[in-house]
Image (spheres, helix red, strand yellow):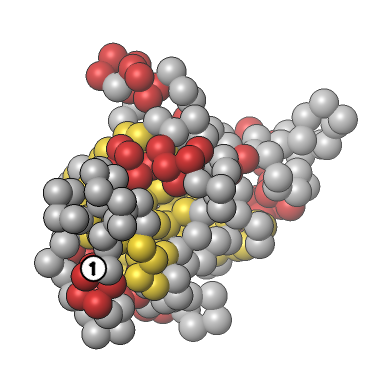
Amino acid sequence: MGDFAKHLYLILFPNEALVASQLTPEEFGMHYSVGSPRHFKGKVIFVEVDINFRHPYLRIEEYLKNTESPIPGRPKRTKFVKSYRVLEHVEFSALQKLYLVTTDGGVLGLDQSEQPSYFSDDRVRLYQEICPLRLLVAASLDPGKFGHYITAETWSKGAPKIFFTKYNIDVDATVSDNAVHAYHMGPLPNVNPTNLPTALKELKEDPTKKTKTVSLNPNLDFVSYKSIKQGFWFSGGEQTIFYRMPGMDELRENYYSWWRLL
């Protein structure tokens, strides 16, 4: 029964859940994206949590004891620990590799990186909140300040901790090309093509405005990982953790088996 190592995975997309498993990260990503009847197909993002991490709210020890397969020689694939308010109860110091899973089950592991420089970054950005909030938000804040604003400065649209990314779009071109045509529905699918440039224009023209909600619907499953700019952030008050997303040339050269599934 104890032939397989146990892992703790915090699923961030498509749902929030802490799961115990005897699958490796690559096996877990494949199982959850294409092998599970409950989530048949789609992107998956999860982060491995230090197996020694404990929190009374999550009752990890209790569920780890039950993470054993009744079939000899077969690992226990999933044992759900908690599916509600998980991220806010996980210490950032317990976060290990972040894993991006394609719709075909390819798994790419990302290590934590130093924060990128924001000095020359665009003033207006487009953020996809992933967990626990799932809004598409335009903001005049850089990623570090945006994460702080959502987790420590706003009550009505905030959360204690948040995981988010930034989309790579041409803000100026999107604002100037505001006309809607039958063949052109904007730079992002599943987003109202008139609301996006309107929100971006409002932020460009009003330097005092910090954020503008673009869409209440999560957009991550409709776009390619190619649309991600810089990477992914965990934020909680003064704490920020960054995972760098490799560029397309780097992915093609060093992670070809994952890149070809994009």
Residue at 66% over, 62% down = 216
Residue at 35% over, 45% down = 28
Query: Could you tell me if residue 124 is visible in this image?
Result: no
Residue at 16% over, 62% down = 51
Residue 73 image position (x, y, % from top left): 24, 44
Q: Mark 1: which amino acid?
A: Leu
Q: Nearer the viewer, residue 93 or 117?
A: 93
- The number of discs equals 1
Q: Quadrant of residue 237?
A: bottom left
Residue 215 image position (x, y, % from top left): 66, 57
In the rendered image of this protein, does residue 65 appear above or below residue 177? Answer: below
Q: Nearer the viewer, residue 50 or 130?
A: 50
Secondary element under disc 1, as helix, strand or loop, is helix
Report crowding for label 1: few under 14, some 14 to 19, many 20 or more residues within 10 A (C-alpha).
many
Q: Report which residue position mark 1 lands on.
A: 64
In the rendered image of this protein, does residue 209 appear above or below residue 185? Answer: below
Residue 175 image position (x, y, % from top left): 67, 41
The answer to whether residue 63 is left or right of residue 169 is: left
Residue at 41% over, 48% down = 45
Q: Quadrant of residue 111?
A: top left
The answer to whether residue 217 is left or right of residue 125 is: right
The answer to whether residue 60 is left or right of residue 35 is: left
